[in-house]
Amino acid sequence: MNKSIRILMFFISLILLSACAPEIGSEKWCDQMDEKSKGDWTANEIADYAKHCVF
């Protein structure tokens, strides 16, 4: 394969993998956060969880 095709395939793979994360505030995201260790949460995740999953 030539170099430009490899680079293109890398970026396509990156886009496909990043699309797998659930939307912040969705039920799936809240469930995922419940399973994650509370010590690993960022400040933004704490605020988003409180905003979307608690209230």
Image: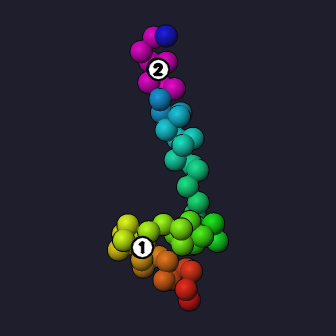
Q: Position of residue 28 (x, y in %)?
A: 63, 66
Q: Residue at x 56, y 89 (%)?
A: 55
Closer to viewer: mark 2 or mark 1: 1
Q: Position of residue 11 (x, y in %)?
A: 48, 33
Q: Residue furthest bottom?
A: 55
Q: Residue furthest right?
A: 27
At numbered mark 1, what does the secondary structure look like: helix, strand or loop?
helix
Q: Residue at x 47, y 29 (%)?
A: 10
Q: Position of residue 7 (x, y in %)?
A: 44, 24
Q: Residue at x 49, y 18 (%)?
A: 5
Picture layout, residue 40 above or below residue 12: below
Q: Tag 1 or tag 2, which sits nearer the N-term?
A: 2
At numbered mark 2, what does the secondary structure look like: helix, strand or loop?
helix
Q: Residue at x 53, y 34 (%)?
A: 13
Please give the range of residues in magenta.
2-9
User: Residue type at mark 2?
Assistant: Arg
Q: Main secondary structure of the magenta part?
A: helix
User: Residue type at mark 1?
Assistant: Lys
* Residue linked to disc 1: 38
* Residue linked to disc 2: 6
